[in-house]
Amino acid sequence: MSDDTELLELVKSLTERIDGLEIKIKALELHAQDVPEETMVAIAAAVAAYLGHRAKRRQPHFTTSRSWSASTRRSQHAHHPLYTR
């Protein structure tokens, strides 16, 4: 019988610990919702730059071509890399 009481005590203590952890997780989720998207983008860009990723600067191309395929083919043939490694 002593094994059963020890087991019950362990289950009760684990249940209390799990309840406490669930409360902490819910509190963290509430804090994460307050961060604006611009801040998250800035943090992601800083981490990417720290890890060595070079951002690609893209420029819109406006063509006077009538068809999409002709303008796409022309842009692919005239492709120049923006930077070299």
Image (spheres, rainbow, N blue to C red):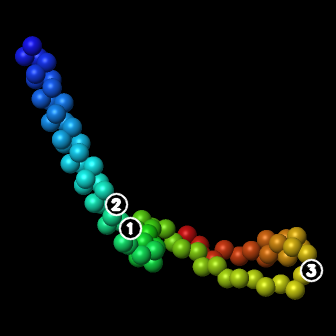
Residue 13 percent location from the top left of the image: 15, 36
Distance from Cα at disc 2 to Cα at disc 1: 7 Å
Binning the other alpha carbons within 10 Å of mark 2 as few (below 14), some (14 to 19) or many (20 upward) gives few
The circle on residue 66 is: 3
Disc 2 secondary structure class? helix
Given the current orientation, which residue lies at the most extreme left position?
Answer: 2
The three-letter code of the residue at mark 3 reads Arg
Q: Give whichever of 36, 63 is nearer the camera.
A: 36
Disc 3 from disc 1: Cα separation: 46 Å
Residue, disc 2: 29
Q: Is residue 52 above or below residue 78?
A: above
Q: Rounded to the nearest whole Å, what is the CA distance between mark 3 and mark 2?
A: 51 Å
- Indicate the position of residue 43 as horizontal and vertical percent values: 40, 72
Q: Do callouts 2 and 1 mark residues in contact (Cβ within 8 Å)?
A: yes
- Above or below for 26 versus 57: above
The reply to whether residue 50 is in sight is no
Q: Residue at x 66, y 74 (%)?
A: 81
Q: Which quarter of the picture shows residue 32?
A: bottom left
